[in-house]
Image (cartoon, rainbow, N blue to C red):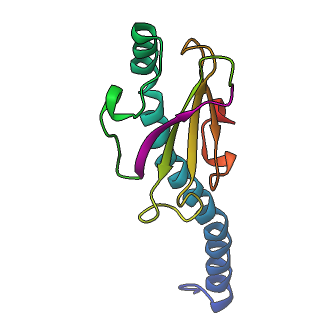
């Protein structure tokens, strides 16, 4: 009567588990990075309405993010800042979120996520900045 497993059977099971782990761990790390970047996406997106309203009321953009939405940061996002937009002829502004240097996935450390409008806040374009690969942001920002 045969009882238990042979050594070769156990070695095959260990090899299969190793192969599955080799595939699953990088996928999970990417998932964690995307979840951390989503915080920055939400922070810059929350600036849309206050900025558009500010521009509509005053005809100019605020000089700091604190004027319209307070000083925002999060668990994975260190700062949200305002900068001049790419367009020099249209009313444009860029909102930038900087990912923290520590406590985040190594693939997104100190990365920048930008949100820009060139038509006084009617439409917004999301795009990645330095240090942040497109694979970590939502499809709307690629």
- In the rendered image, residue 100, in percent from the top left (x then y), is placed at 44, 57
**Total numbered labels placed on residues in the image:** 0
**In the visual, does 44 lie left or right of 5?**
left
Image side of residue 20 versus residue 93, left or right: right
Instruction: Say which residue appears at 56% left-offset and 14% top-offset.
Output: 120
Q: Quadrant of the C terminus?
A: top right
Q: Is residue 37 above or below residue 109?
A: above
* Viewer-closest of 125 and 120: 120
What are the residue bounds of the magenta stretch? 77-87
| On-image quarter of the N terminus | bottom right
The residue most toward the bottom is 7
Q: Position of residue 37 (x, y in %)?
A: 51, 46
Q: Verify whether residue 97 appears in magenta.
A: no
User: Where on the picture, by quarter, is residue 12?
Assistant: bottom right
Foreground residue among 101 and 55: 55
The picture quadrant where one finds residue 21 is: bottom right
Residue, far top? 57
On the image, the x and y values in percent for residue 111 come to 56, 54
The residue nearer to you, when weighing 38 against 64, is 64
Is 79 or 140 nearer to us in this picture? Answer: 79
Image spot of residue 82 (x, y percent): 48, 35
Residue lying at 44% horizontally and 20% vertically, measured from the top left: 51
* Residue at position x 67%, y 47% in the image: 135
Q: What secondary structure prevails in the magenta region?
A: strand
Left or right: 88 in relation to 30: right
Residue 94 lies in what quarter of the image? Answer: top right
């Amino acid at each position: 009567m045969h009882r238990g497993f042979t050594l070769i059977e156990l070695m095959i099971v260990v090899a299969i588990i190793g192969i599955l782990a080799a595939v699953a761990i990088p996928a999970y790390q990417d998932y964690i990075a995307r979840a951390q970047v989503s915080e920055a996406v939400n922070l810059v997106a929350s600036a849309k309405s206050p900025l558009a309203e500010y521009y509509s009321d005053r005809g100019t953009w605020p000089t700091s993010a604190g004027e319209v939405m307070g000083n925002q940061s999060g668990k994975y996002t260190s700062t949200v800042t305002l900068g001049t937009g790419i367009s020099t002829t249209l009313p444009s502004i860029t909102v930038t979120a900087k990912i923290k240097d520590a406590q985040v996935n190594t693939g997104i450390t100190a990365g920048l996520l930008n949100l820009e409008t060139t038509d006084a806040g009617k439409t917004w374009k999301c795009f990645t900045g330095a240090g942040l690969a497109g694979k970590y942001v939502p499809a709307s920002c690629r």
